[in-house]
Image (cartoon, grey):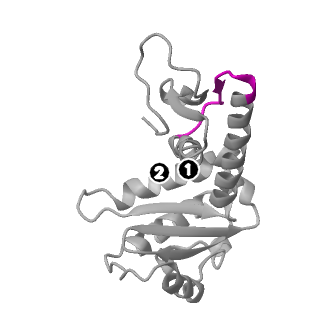
Amino acid sequence: MDENKRSPEMDGALLIDNDAASETKSSYSEVPLQEDGKAELACEMLIEILAHMDLQAEVTIRENAEEVVLDIKADDVGRIIGKKGQTLDALQFVINKIVNRFPEGRRHILIDCGDYRERRENGLASMARREAKRAMQQSRIITLEPMSPRDRRVIHLSLAKFPGVSTRSDGSGLDRRVRIIPSRRGPRGGGRFSRNREE
């Protein structure tokens, strides 16, 4: 962001902790970092968007050769995360579109806030195991609520080695959901069936 274009009320509101970022970079991976400027561009664009949202936040960068993680620290984490991470996912989608406009040298940008991603994944994995046990006990298919592709993938992976069940994604668009199927129950109607993986 151009220092001369900052409005007085926003001056100093959004900070990049370069010292913390560099410390985290070295511990995140031993893979040599790409000096392509994409991490810095992603961070700059995220700061611009947060500024337009009137949010005071601090953004740090962690990266390896393939992925850039932008960690947001803020008082109002609820607004940044949104319901079930929808705002965080939207920010991540936009930043990835900006940074990876061209196919060469693509790097995935992951945006996190208050360790939300890890807590969400742990919660989903626990719920998946609980529902898998219920599916086996009741000998019936359990259909979960609609989820994002990322959340569905967590469910599939967490149950990939869970004995006695398989998983399948059904539906389309925003209504796509995971079904947990006990082993003794097979697919009905001759439809396509995928074991333990996202379609």
Query: Quick one: 29 or 82, which is closer to the camera?
Result: 29
Residue ID at (50%, 82%) = 25
Location of residue 194 in the rendering, given as x and y in whole percent from the top left corner: 44, 31
Location of residue 21 in the rendering, given as x and y in whole percent from the top left corner: 55, 82
Location of residue 152 in the rendering, given as x and y in whole percent from the top left corner: 55, 40
Residue ID at (38%, 80%) = 31
How many marks the image carries: the answer is: 2
Is residue 12 toward the left or the right of residue 21 in the image? right
Q: Is residue 76 above or below residue 3?
A: above
Sort mark 2 into few (<14), some (14-19) or many (20+) by Cα contacts within 10 Å. some
Residues at badges 1 and 2 in contact (C-beta under 8 Å)?
Answer: yes
Q: Which residues are magenta?
A: 137-148
Mark number, residue 182: none
Q: Quadrant of residue 99?
A: bottom left
Is residue 194 toward the left or the right of residue 145 in the image? left
Query: Quick one: 26 or 91, which is closer to the camera?
Result: 26
Magenta stretch, overall SS: loop
Residue with the mark numbered 2: 93
Q: Give the amino acid at mark 2.
A: Phe
Q: Secondary structure at mark 2?
A: helix
Sort mark 1 into few (<14), some (14-19) or many (20+) by Cα contacts within 10 Å. some
Label 1 to label 2, Cα distance in Å? Answer: 6 Å
Residue with the mark numbered 1: 89
Location of residue 106 in the rendering, given as x and y in whole percent from the top left corner: 31, 62
Q: Is residue 187 above or below residue 95?
A: above
Q: Is residue 10 magenta?
A: no
Q: Secondary structure at mark 1?
A: helix
